[in-house]
Image: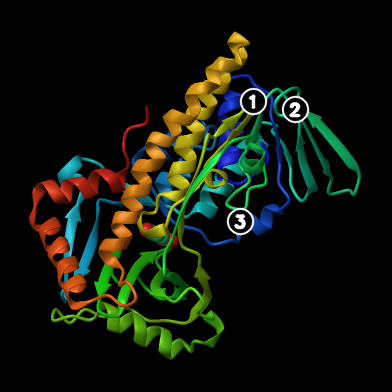
């Protein structure tokens, strides 16, 4: 596995369970990965993948269930009011608020417990001969030169993947958006029982959570925004204005303990396999964060990947890997559409006309007043079945 984030570690975990030896390489330190804030929502099947494949075996507790928070829906807020979309009632499913950093820690603990070969803080990772007998060379944390030969290389090296460049004759599809997200972590109590996705005349805002006393919030901003130039008062003014409404709602405020501007784009590369190299997660695709699909897609990739790799090695037939791209990309494109749709429905495009604004409100109103519309949102948000 080139990449020891959640995708690489989950691939290593599932393959280990199938009796296949793996080596995980990552240039980052465990601490760096554990402290990089990422998204926080797990689909129903992502939770199942953690609880049903022995990640917590022997621990006596399934941390995602005991430490995570089950959310039976979300609030869509527009026109000065909140509208609850009740996933439980609509599709009988819920999602879990459980930060990606926790998923990483759980998988890292599971692989360590099971004797996994994890090599962090390596450098100069290079993958050779994926069309023949793959080798991966790198400089170890000790400064020495190392080489690993492998039957299959999994490129799980994230949104700035080097592995994806090794896929011959690839096609790439990209969409840029004229905005980004300003994200903060703050010390404050929760402002609502579930997440609030808000559309306002000043643009989008998302009120998410981390713990009882730490909250995660975002608001749409210009991609060139400098987070350091905002005072805390200005951040709270902006968030409060975007959430304000006739119902008198207001956010619980507190000290801002982290802030950053998040990139925002849609990207897909196809195929996701070349020779003995397979790509997983952000290495092959990026979605805007508006539907919280990034980590969920990576885990869904890996579930399919582990199954086809296991079969290919068992049958000694690489052609089995052929089905991976189509099976993974079917879900990726659904998620691309879902994230794009949630984004365009809730964000303010620079230069939007009055027509655009009123059409957007029309769309949101038809969504929350229609059982079919709300069910469509609930299905996408809680996640489609994996094929
Ligand atoms: C988060 O909690 O970081 C989060 C939640 C939902 C999203 C995006 C990010 O759609």
Please name the residue that numbered disc 2 is placed on. 134
Q: Label 1's element?
A: loop
- Does residue 63 appear in this view? yes
Q: Tell me if I can see residue 194 in this picture.
A: no
Is 106 placed above or below 255 here?
above
Q: Quadrant of the C terminus?
A: top left
- Measuring 51% from the left and 30% from the top, which residue is drawn there? 54
The residue nearer to you, when weighing 383 against 364, is: 364
> Residue 82, position in %: x, y?
18, 68
Q: Which residue is mark 1?
A: 275
Question: In whole angstroms, how far apart are the C-alphas of marks 3 and 1?
Answer: 32 Å
Q: Residue 142 placed where, x, y %?
A: 88, 48
Q: Disc 3 vs disc 1: which is toward the camera?
A: 1
Q: Is residue 146 left or right of residue 40?
A: right
Q: Position of residue 186 (x, y in %)?
A: 46, 75
Quadrant where the N terminus is found in the figure: top right
Q: Are marks 3 and 1 in contact (CB under 8 Å)?
A: no
Which comes sooner in the sequence, label 3 or label 1?
A: 3
Distance in Å between CA atoms under marks 1 and 2: 9 Å
Q: Position of residue 335 (x, y in %)?
A: 36, 45
Q: Nearer the viewer, residue 162 or 249?
A: 162
């Amino acid at each position: 596995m080139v990449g020891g984030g959640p995708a690489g570690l989950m691939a290593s975990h599932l393959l280990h369970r199938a009796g296949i030896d793996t080596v995980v390489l990552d240039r980052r330190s465990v601490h760096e990965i554990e402290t990089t804030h990422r998204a926080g929502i797990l689909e129903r099947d992502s939770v199942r993948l953690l609880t049903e494949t022995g990640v917590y075996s022997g621990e006596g507790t399934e941390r995602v269930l005991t430490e995570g928070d089950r959310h039976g829906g979300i609030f869509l807020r527009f026109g000065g009011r909140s509208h609850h979309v009740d996933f439980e009632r609509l599709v009988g499913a819920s999602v879990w608020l459980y930060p990606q950093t926790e998923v990483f820690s759980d998988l890292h603990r599971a692989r360590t417990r099971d004797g996994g070969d994890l090599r962090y803080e390596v450098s100069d990772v290079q993958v050779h001969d994926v069309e023949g007998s793959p080798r991966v060379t790198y400089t170890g944390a000790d400064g020495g030169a190392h080489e690993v030969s492998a039957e299959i290389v999994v490129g799980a090296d994230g949104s700035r993947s080097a592995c994806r460049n090794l896929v011959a004759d690839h096609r790439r599809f990209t969409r840029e958006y004229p905005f980004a997200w300003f994200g903060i972590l703050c010390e404050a109590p929760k402002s609502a029982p579930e997440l609030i996705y808000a559309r306002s005349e000043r643009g989008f805002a998302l009120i998410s959570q981390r713990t009882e006393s730490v909250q995660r919030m975002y608001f749409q901003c210009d991609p060139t925004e400098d987070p350091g130039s905002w005072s805390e008062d200005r951040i709270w003014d902006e968030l409060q204005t975007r959430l304000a409404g006739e119902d008198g709602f207001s956010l619980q405020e507190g000290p801002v303990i982290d802030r950053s501007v998040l990139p925002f784009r849609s990207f897909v590369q196809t195929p996701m396999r070349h020779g003995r190299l397979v790509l997983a997660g952000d290495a092959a695709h990026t979605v805007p964060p508006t539907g919280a699909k990034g980590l969920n897609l990576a885990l869904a990739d890996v579930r399919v990947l582990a199954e086809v790799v296991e079969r290919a090695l068992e049958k000694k037939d690489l052609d089995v890997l052929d089905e991976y791209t189509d099976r993974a990309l079917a879900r990726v494109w659904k998620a691309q559409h879902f994230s794009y749709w949630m984004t365009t429905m809730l964000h303010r495009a620079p230069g939007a006309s009055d027509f655009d604004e009123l059409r957007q409100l029309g769309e949101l109103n038809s969504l929350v007043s229609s059982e079919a519309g709300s069910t469509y949102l609930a299905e996408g948000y809680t996640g489609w079945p994996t094929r």
